[in-house]
Image (cartoon, helix red, strand yellow):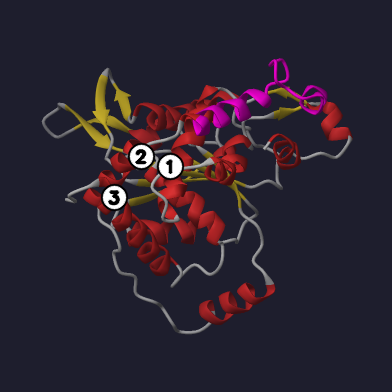
């Protein structure tokens, strides 16, 4: 496709700009959120979006899928949703033979809406698919589509009747992305665009083969040893019983991030570097992706709650 990796990296930068220009036709603002979602797509990760209803989370993912020419499925999680509703089931056909009917998980981009509203066994069915990229039904393995990306949403307000994701399952998400309210100017643009008759047409900015190629390219990006050491020391610092943990971390954190955080910091930094026109990541790229990667991996203690500290302010102390 390209003669050298440098040529491919330049093409990636152009593709990202085209992709963002197409997405901006329908999604106003939320640039940081879109950036982080795109990084997780190209790093073969998954993302958890946390935000109140009505902030265009579903529209954003739908738009990204359209601009990438990928298949998109939305699963609305409810307390009575069963694993077979997600992965599919075997049914008897007219010849009295078992036939596998694929569930909505057989798609490129999955929006798992309000994932914390469904019981743990259904959450686990999706999370197995996320980790292994296969599903097992009646002892048979079924390979999922490539690329495969899960974007789950959670509503931070209503906690009644929810099943919070356990730490082990949260760890499978590369990013925990906070979606905030739009600014005054952005909200005016949103109202003007959505209450009129305009319906912008989206063009496919990147195809399936190119996505898979760029996912491999990101893996090949060289990283300086000092950047790897910085990423690992950052994760080590988040663990209260580690040698280099500060008194602040020992005081306010009960559990720190695991090795998966270090892997994602390096992968995220590689993609972030290419996205802004660099050929190799530096410490600034690691810092740029640190908050969404560490946000759901640190468990603060009661003292942090009592002192009104949020996880972001704890991460800011160790970066």
Across and down, in percent, residue 151 comes to 47, 45
Choose between 55 and 163: the one closer to the eye: 55
Q: Main secondary structure of the magenta part?
A: helix
Using a 10 Å C-alpha cutoff, classify the residue at mark 2 as few (fewer than 14 neighbours), some (14 to 19) or many (20 or more): some
Evaluate whether residue 119 shows in this view: no
Furthest residue in direction left, as rendered:
95
Instruction: Report if residue 230 lies within the magenta region.
Output: yes
Q: Is any atom of residue 152 visible in this view?
A: yes
At 38% from the left and 45% from the top, the residue drawn is: 42
**Magenta stretch in the rendered image:** 226-251
**Contact, CB < 8 Å: mark 1 with mark 2?**
yes
Which residue is more in the foreground, 96 or 235?
235
Q: Secondary structure at mark 2?
A: loop
Query: Alpha carbon of mark 2 to alpha carbon of mark 3: how far?
Result: 10 Å
The residue carrying pointer 3 sits among few (fewer than 14), some (14 to 19) or many (20 or more) residues within 10 Å by Cα, namely some
Q: Residue at x 70, y 37 (%)?
A: 315
Q: Position of residue 296 (x, y in %)?
A: 62, 35
Q: Which residue position is annotated with label 1?
A: 270
Judged from the image, the secondary structure of the residue bearing numbered disc 3 is helix
Residue under label 2: 221
Going from the N terminus, do you reach mark 1 or mark 2 first? 2
Where on the picture, by quarter, is residue 267? top left
The answer to whether residue 120 is left or right of residue 143 is right
Q: Which residue is mark 3?
A: 6
Residue 168, position in %: x, y? 56, 23
What is the secondary structure assignment of the residue under circle 1? helix
């Amino acid at each position: 496709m390209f003669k050298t990796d440098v040529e491919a990296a330049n093409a990636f930068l152009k593709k990202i700009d085209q992709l963002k220009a197409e997405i901006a036709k329908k999604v106003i603002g939320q640039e940081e959120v879109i950036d982080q979602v795109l990084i997780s797509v190209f790093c073969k990760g998954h993302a958890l979006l946390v935000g109140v209803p009505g902030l265009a989370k579903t529209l954003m993912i739908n738009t990204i899928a359209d601009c990438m020419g990928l298949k998109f499925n939305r699963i609305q999680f409810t307390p009575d949703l069963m694993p077979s509703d997600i992965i599919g089931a075997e049914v008897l056909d007219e010849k009295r033979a078992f036939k596998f009917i694929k569930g909505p998980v057989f798609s490129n981009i999955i929006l798992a809406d309000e994932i914390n509203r469904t019981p743990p066994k259904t959450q686990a069915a999706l999370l197995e698919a996320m980790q292994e990229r296969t599903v097992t039904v009646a002892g048979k393995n079924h390979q999922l589509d490539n690329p495969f990306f899960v974007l789950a949403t959670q509503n931070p307000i209503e906690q009644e009747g929810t099943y919070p994701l356990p730490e082990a399952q949260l760890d499978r998400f590369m990013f925990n992305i906070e979606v905030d309210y739009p600014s005054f100017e952005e909200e005016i643009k949103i109202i003007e665009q959505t209450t009129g008759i305009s319906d912008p047409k989206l063009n496919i900015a990147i195809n399936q083969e190119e996505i898979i190629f760029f996912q491999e390219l990101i893996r090949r990006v060289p990283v300086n040893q000092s950047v790897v050491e910085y990423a690992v020391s950052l994760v080590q610092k988040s663990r209260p019983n580690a040698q280099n943990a500060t008194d602040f971390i020992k005081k306010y954190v009960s559990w720190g991030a695991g090795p998966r955080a270090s892997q994602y910091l390096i992968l995220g930094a590689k993609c972030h570097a290419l996205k802004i026109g660099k050929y190799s990541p530096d410490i600034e790229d690691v810092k740029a992706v640190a908050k969404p990667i560490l946000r759901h991996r640190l468990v603060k203690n009661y003292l942090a709650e009592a002192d009104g500290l949020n996880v972001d302010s704890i991460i800011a102390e160790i970066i």
